[in-house]
Amino acid sequence: MLASITSACLLGIDGHPVRVEVHLTSGLPGFAIVGLPDTACREARDRVRAAVANSGFEFPMRKITVNLAPSSLRKAGSGLDLAMAVGVLAASDQVPGGELDALAFFGELGLDGSLRPVRGMVSLVDASPVRTVVVPAASVAEATVYGRHEVRSARRLIEVVEALRSDAPWPDPPTPAEPVRPLAPVMLRDLADVSGQVAARKALEVAAAGGHHLLMVGPPGAGKTMLASRLPGLLPPLGVDEALAVARIRSAVGEPLAGGELPMVPPFRAPHHTASPVALTGGGTGVLRPGEVSRASHGVLFLDELGEFATAVLDALRQPLEEGVIRITRAQASATFPARFLLVGAMNPCPCGMAGPEGCTCTDGERARYRRRLSGPLVDRFDLRVDVDRPSPDELLRGEPGEGTAVVAARVREARARAATRGVACNAHIPRRRLDDLCPVTPETELVLEGALAGGRLSARGLDRVRRVARTLADLEGHDGPAAPLHVKMALALRAQPLVAAS
Amino acid sequence: MDLPDEAYLTGIASIPGVGPATMRNELAAGTPPEAWDRLRSRPGAPTDLDRLWARHQEAGIVVCGHQHPAFPDVLRDDPEPPAVLFCRGDLAVLERRRVAVVGTRNASRYGLGVAERLGERLGAAGVAVVSGLALGVDGAVHRGLLHTGGAPPVGVVACGLDVVYPGRHRDLWQRVGAEGLLVSEMPLGLRPTRWSFPARNRIIAGLSEVVVVVESRQTGGSLYTADSALLRDIPLLAVPGPITSPAAYGTNRLIADGATPVCSVDDVFVTLGLTSPTGGSAPVPEPGGVAGRILDACAHESVTLQALVDRSGLTLPETVAAIDDLCRTGWLAESTGRYERTTPVAVPALDVGARARR
């Protein structure tokens, strides 16, 4: 009369184990779900009833109570359907109860008894307290990512029940628990496609090596997007832990993984400039979902047409930029999502986009309005700011191809290895208090910095950032010891003052 | 009633529809109290002259009619003299050498740069710069002047001194009033009108010994200042610009019509009869070698780092090193990610960087 089934539900990007307790009793036939289910979860009632009946089993004409424990946890979505159906069948003795304690069940049911995948399978399986999990066949790829669980899969409810009754073997051979298989990096777009643009290429390389945020300003057609899309290839491939974190987030937003393999290429997210604040930060009603900043975590967040984004959206980036996480707080729930990404912005110098004093047809007011959209604190967080010109016709037709991704990526790897010896993933993460220790100023470099400070080319806030960038430049050249004056000069040159109101 | 003549003039000037010409005609026909009695019945005329006058006194405005001892001597023999002037600040500024620098509100980066540099150099030489506090060139020249802190600025505006127009120049407006001189033909509370800008422009010309137009469009208000200068036999200079730039159309046309082109800031000093601060010393020799190639690549445009690399044929590190040296020695200035050529002036080394600002 009582059955207890193991499952899990998704909160944010994390799975939480849930016990599905099913109790049958005499009384008026009915089906009640208690334990804080949301609408989709409560609708399981109708799906389970139809799926059980359509799979050829008897739906007990008794009073059914389903309790989802712990009852204080809000359950959302349809991932508990399968567990409820198995619970109902076990409680009505249509399925033997013996083996059930060693299994966890995940998946949504169709009215015909088919099993459908749900969001967040990576985290759900990871949260499972028992070693063997039963998932929809379409979710096997996600379920095996961690490789810590034995995964059995089925396409229909009846296949699950037959396997449990030992009438038939599990339809797909069980996937053994095995370590993750990293996916070989696919051939990304090559940096050699970008001809000329030595300044922007250098900035890109420094951004990849040091994790410094990059802002590119230039007219349409200068190649800003082309440059930014080469960045994931320059970044070192993800470590296994990072790749797993990325897979969790991807799974939680419902993006399937291809082929059950772990993508090791850093994510590259390029939301359109009409994105809402919630789309970027995450949130939403009911279940909090991660936004673009989290999906870009461990990778690149590319904001094209930065000047067209709503001011509220851009200012929402400040916390993740500062802390590497984003905390979403709503009346019903709160969640902390990872959000440590490399921010790359691209924008036109003014609304008409025609850089240069001669071509620009914008009025003074239009330019001022455009610049006001970027708050000073946000612009300040871009360690690297380069003006990108349109390549000259000569360059386009006869320019020699620049260095390829492989060559530059090798330098980036070397530089990151040097940063790792200092105990940071990349130089942009060097904390302020360790700056004097790790990025010391020599008398020669002090002279350069002093000149820039006196000349107004550098603000006190920018000073620390220039020191970190200079460190990265030195690392890229395999230069040990303090950064040389030329590194500091280069760091200054790659940190142009864009968009400071000219009038 | 023992109000001074200036109080009546303030009252007359506050009447809607009474401009400088009407005032001149009315005052030619009688004393200010008589003119006031004739005009006070016009619609919109102030009803309480005592209060109006008290308001100007409290605001610390110096009101001077044509006969007032404080009235600027240079305007006494003007062909269209203002009947009354409202001033805030130090009228003694007008005893200095005075140059008007005016231009379009919608200036190019080049125009703004020239204006700012003119302000800096003139200010450093102790020359008072007269301008209109408008957006664009007017604002840039006074910013340059205030930046060096040499001579005090003179701002001539087209509305009451308590009506800040344009609103974005509130800070500039206050600094000019505090550190230099603010002049208007309009009493407190009057908003600018269509005709008050050309009227203001004639005062800018009248107060100055030399008028420099930095940039002007085909039908710019600064062309009215230029006309006023010609009418008063005041030397007129114009800054040449690219023939492709709409912002330089008016100034290039002025040069074609006989205005003296400003080929360097020194030309303004020559017109004033002054030796420029750099005139005495030998010009700094242009650097050669790598630095010279960068300067050649700059070609008097504002160019990006990338363009300098492409044009000079140098590597990125060589270019960066050369740029840093040139910025330090004053041959190059960075502004919003672009580099422009400048001419170093013989100033102490520590001060060089100051010009690279903004």
Image: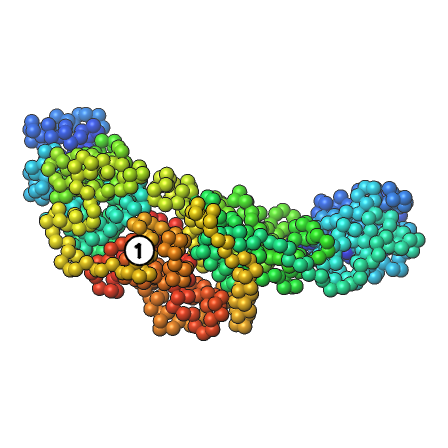
| One can see residue B105 in this view | no
Report the label total: 1
Left or right, B245 with reference to A27: left
Q: Position of residue A32 (x, y in %)?
A: 79, 47
The image shows residue B282, relative to residue A110, as above or below, that is: below
Q: Amino acid at mark 1?
A: Leu
Q: Residue at x 50, y 63 (%)?
A: A210
Q: Which of the image's four quarters has the N terminus of chain B?
A: top left
Q: Residue at x 82, y 48 (%)?
A: A155
Q: Which of the image's four quarters has the C terminus of chain B?
A: bottom left
Q: Position of residue B4 (x, y in %)?
A: 9, 38
Q: Position of residue A412 (x, y in %)?
A: 53, 63
| One can see residue A502 in this view | yes
Q: Residue at x 39, y 66 (%)?
A: A486
Q: Residue at x 14, y 29 (%)?
A: B21
Residue beneath disc 1: B295
Left or right, B284 with reference to A266: left
Q: Position of residue A126 (x, y in %)?
A: 72, 60
The image shows residue A483, relative to residue A327, as above or below, that is: below
> What is the chain identity of the residue bearing mark 1?
B
Depth check, front residue: B258 or B167: B258
